[in-house]
Image (tube, coloured by chain):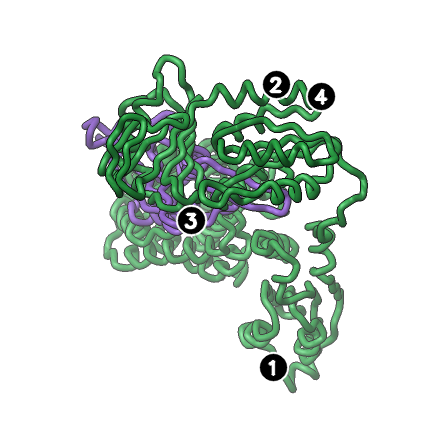
Amino acid sequence: MSIDLNTNYGHVTITNDVIATVAGGAAVECYGIVGMASKNQLKDGIAEILRKENFSRGVIVRQEEESVHIDMYIIVSYGTKISEVAHNVQSQVKYTLNQTVGLSVDSVNIYIQGVRVAKDEE
Amino acid sequence: MTTRTLDGATFAQMVLSGAHHLTNNAKMIDALNVFPVPDGDTGTNMNLSMTSGANEVRNVQNDHVGEVAKSFAKGLLMGARGNSGVILSQLFRGFSKAVEDKQTITTADLAEAFDAGVKTAYKAVMKPVEGTILTVAKDSAEAAQKAAEDHEDIIDFMEDVLKHANASLKRTPELLPVLKEVGVVDSGGQGLVTIYEGFLANLKGEELPESAESTPSMDEMVNAEHHKLAQDFMDTSEIEFGYCTEFMVKFEDEKLQENPFDEDTFRNELSEIGDSLLVVSDDELVKVHVHAEHPGDAMNLGQRFGSLINMKIENMREQHTSIVGEQKKSQPKSQEKADYAIVTVAMGSGIKEMFESLGATVVIEGGQTMNPSTQDLTEAIQEAHAKNVILLPNNKNIIMAAEQAADLAEDNVTVVPTKTVPQGMSALLAFNPEVSIDDNSESMQEAASAVKTGQLTYAVRDTQIDGMDIEEGNFMGIKDGKISITHKEKLEAAKALLSDMIDEEEDEILTILQGEEATTEEVEALEAFLEENFEDLEVEVHKGNQPIYSFIFSVE
């Protein structure tokens, strides 16, 4: 799957991988996120925190007709207001995609796959 | 007088004073907000978070610093809004943990608490961005360590911390490129400095001035406004208010007696005639920045209170046009013939677009049931207007007509006999404008023959082909022109065709052209099937919108 844009100069195709990477990159800079989780976590049984090159693993780009939806699987830091962190991620991802690939997404859905407690608080 | 210890009641007053000072400056901080999302709400968010923290503190009837700090942290957490609010809640969560057992605290305790706050805040983010509130908190916590060694007096200590927080804030544009680009300091950092100012003023027993000491300059706020605007407009025609208007009004007593000045009233009046509005006033002056369609109206409103000074008006449509460098409409075709052109045949709007994007000069809409005639092809060759034309029919039923059109044409026309869309695409990708038409013909044929094509369609009547019985409505998989699969279910037929086509050892790339009769769900089901059975294969999906064929597959 990919997103196609037409400009005055021709045709631009952006693959879903690119979108997922950009979205993942925007998310990990968001305050309160300590990792992206694999969407197959339920299968894997552990919320393994993804390394940088796998940002896109916890991001799913869905296209339905004309609209684009993004699902993100994230791990947040214990002791933050989770609802607000999720909201911040949504707005940052939406903005970043709009700015960098000129893509206006219809929804950014956040799945909190885990909460990580810092070592000294356990 | 020196204060060497801080009790809970004093700390509570400090918090309230910080919150109050932030409230007074929230609008200014909003105006600075360009990062991470320039939506101008940092000040509002921080203020809501801080107010929630202050409200918890008000309810504490306790002189124990640890208890007060704990309530403050709890209130911040509950009321956290926006990135800056969440960060603030973490800073003071760490802070309160460090002082939780303490009845009173010294400068050393405070330094340790600031440090603990920064550590906690940094732990809650995967990739801390420097040049933000985090940096300002970190730098001032570092300064606090040293300040605690130098001062036992809390006021002297806090003065040092504030001084370094301010210096750190001034450095934020060096760390975060977007700030430098726009010419502002970080809004969240500004918020934190404002809170620290409130702390210190309370310790000193000073009345707080309405605006922060470190008030962002009008220029900074204007820069941020323009940045936000630049994000919004793609097109000059979208600019509603065409003139960036800046001026100051120097108040005159006579006029003020007739028209008493009230900042909010004035702001509301201006907001009727423009946007990107900034109004800042003190006892002598009011500064105005507004984007208006009629700059004169804005100035007339201001002139009621005094005399106009430092006026500047810019036409933003002119500027924007020169920035965007708007395109003139397409040039008329030159009379010169090009060296090379490629004429090809496509069915479906998506496939036509793909061919155009791959560099085809003229794409004729044709296909299985509406094959272009020799006449259509001849016209297309003329339209291509080139000395050498390469013709890609992409369908075995069009090859004949293409050969005829090539014979009739005055130009040097060569047919590369591609039988399918994927073959045509591969041939087109192999085209090299630098070499002769004969060399091109050869390399393009070679590229076309390297592609395996699969097509999925349905039978319109009962028939027997290639030794298979096929019932009306059944789906057929056609591999390189031969029917190889038939099945009642579309997806099953598609999967069987794919399995038949793909050689796991050899093949690297599969391209799926989604026809107008194929749904997104079907495509996703195929992708999942491929992922499971051929995990090393790279899959690309394009909307071909071709009729008749739900899917066209190409494997290389």
The amino acid marked with disc number 4 is Ser
Label 1 vs label 3, nearer the camera: 3
Taking the spot 55% from the left edge, 27% from the top edge, the residue there is B417
Disc 1 marks which residue? B260
**Which residue corresponds to the image point at 38% horizontal and 33% vertical from the top-left?**
B455
| Horizontal side, residue B122 vs residue B204: left or right | left
Q: Mark 3 or mark 2: which is in front?
A: 2
Q: Which of the chains is purple? A: A
Give the amino acid at mark 2. Answer: Glu
Q: Amino acid at mark 3?
A: Val
Which chain hosts label 2? B
Q: Which label's residue is closer to the chain start, 2 or 4?
A: 4
Label 1 marks a residue whose chain is: B
Q: Return the residue at label 2.
A: B442
**Labels 2 and 4 in the same subunit:** yes
User: Is there CB contact under 8 Å for labels 3 and 4?
Assistant: no
Name the disc covering residue A105, or none.
3
The chain in green: B
Which residue is depicted at the point 67% across and 20% down? Answer: B438
For label 1, the crowd category at 10 Å Cα-Cα, with few meaning under 14, some 14 to 19 and many 20 or more, is few
Q: Which residue is mark 4?
A: B436
Callout 3: chain:
A
Question: How many marks can you see?
Answer: 4
